[in-house]
């Protein structure tokens, strides 16, 4: 056993090797960018007619909206993934377990509030919740933390305040509606949840010692690249929505307060945007009511396509289908009630 430990320690990546990996990644990124630039130049030279399409006012407006959303959201996405990776690598899961009351009904709101103290993206909250359950935390409390952590953490709230300048009521409404949804879902699980629906799968132990740096780097790489792709996709979809959808059709959605809420709730599920950046996409969807914007930001971090897949792989499909459907309904209800009260 000691021999295996020594061999494993020998292969661990130290700070020098991690720095070399970072430098290599930056070089590859630079080479990739140069290759894309060269390819784009070649295409434009070979097909000069494309320049007319690039200079089209509609495309320029689309490009402006896309760039604005990505540039605004990228710093917060990076900050959120750094925090998430640091928590996954350095903060033990038992920390939350020690802070929770033994009574599950009381543990649910405490776990919900703890989401603001231990932030992370929605992708990271699923394995953390599974780990908490394996360590003996009540499933209702772990699920409340799963929903609240990506929705009410400081990075998300600061990003929301910048995406909606001069509107602190939007930040308060997002915090209130998201916390209310997470606590309501925890209590709902206590009342109606069945153990056979929830089957958390075993996961390998966290690395120790020098491996924590490598775990941090791998987590940062995975979360940033994964969430960054969804941010770009969401920004492109938002820009396309603003430019391509005819104004009369948009007025059909925006003219009805209830229909606009449903449309943005469904859009949040489909786009699957990271919670650190969804406020910028929401603010770019002009014409919709503040309650619809709030619904988009509350639903997104709790129910989207990638989360349904992650929950299916971690807890089982039977749980993911029931839990996602119930969370969507509760999130829309809480967003509507809180929005009508605060907005």
Image (tube, rainbow, N blue to C red):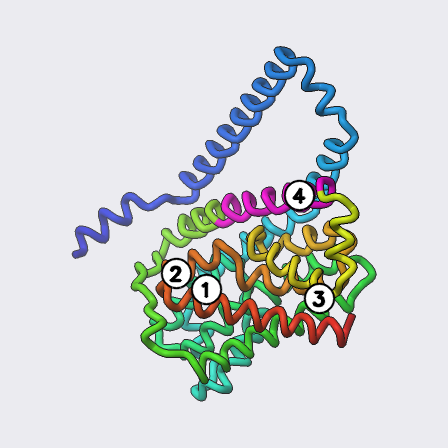
Q: Mark 2 points at which residue?
A: 312
* Residue 6 placement, left or right of 95: left
Residue drawn at x 67%, y 74% as measured from the top left: 176
Secondary structure under badge 4? helix
Indicate yes or no whether the magenta region holds residue 146: no
- Which portion, as a residue range, is magenta? 223-244
Q: Name the residue under label 3.
A: 258
Labels 3 & 4 near each other (Cβ < 8 A) = no
Q: Where is residue 269 in the image (x, y as percent from the top left)?
A: 56, 57
Secondary structure under badge 1? loop
Mark 2 or 3: the one toward you: 3
**Image quadrant of residue 104?**
bottom left
Q: How far apart are marks 2 and 1 (CA)?
A: 25 Å
Q: In which quarter of the image is the C terminus?
A: bottom right
The answer to whether 277 is drawn above or below residue 257 in the figure is above
For this orientation, the residue located farthest to the right is: 166
């Amino acid at each position: 056993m000691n021999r295996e430990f020594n061999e494993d320690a020998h292969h661990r990546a130290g700070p020098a090797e991690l720095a070399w990996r970072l430098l290599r990644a930056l070089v590859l990124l630079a080479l990739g960018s140069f290759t894309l630039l060269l390819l784009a130049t070649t295409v434009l030279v070979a097909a000069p007619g494309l320049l007319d399409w690039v200079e089209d006012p509609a495309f320029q407006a689309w490009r402006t909206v896309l760039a604005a959303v990505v540039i605004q959201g990228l710093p917060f996405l990076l900050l959120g993934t750094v925090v998430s990776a640091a928590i996954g690598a350095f903060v033990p899961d038992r920390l939350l377990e020690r802070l929770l009351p033994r009574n599950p009904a009381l543990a649910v709101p405490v776990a919900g509030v703890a989401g603001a103290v231990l932030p992370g993206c929605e992708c990271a909250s699923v394995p953390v919740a599974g780990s908490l359950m394996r360590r003996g935390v009540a499933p209702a409390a772990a699920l409340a933390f799963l929903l609240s952590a990506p929705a009410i953490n400081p990075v998300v709230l600061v990003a929301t305040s910048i995406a909606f300048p001069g509107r602190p009521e939007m930040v308060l409404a997002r915090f209130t509606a998201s916390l209310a949804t997470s606590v309501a879902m925890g209590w709902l699980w206590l009342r109606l949840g069945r153990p056979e629906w929830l089957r958390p799968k075993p996961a390998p132990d966290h690395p120790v010692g020098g491996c924590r740096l490598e775990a941090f780097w791998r987590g940062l790489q995975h979360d940033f690249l994964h969430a960054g792709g969804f941010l770009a996709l969401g920004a492109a979809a938002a820009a396309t929505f603003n430019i391509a959808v005819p104004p009369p059709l948009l007025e059909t959605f925006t003219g009805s307060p209830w229909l606009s809420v449903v449309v943005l709730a469904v859009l949040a599920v489909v786009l699957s945007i990271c919670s650190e950046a969804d406020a910028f996409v929401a603010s770019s969807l002009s014409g919709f009511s503040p309650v619809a914007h709030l619904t988009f930001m509350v639903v997104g971090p709790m129910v989207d396509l990638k989360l349904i897949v992650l929950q299916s792989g971690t807890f089982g499909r039977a749980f993911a289908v029931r839990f996602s459907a119930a969370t969507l309904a509760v999130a829309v209800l809480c967003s509507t009630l809180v929005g009508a009260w605060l907005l």
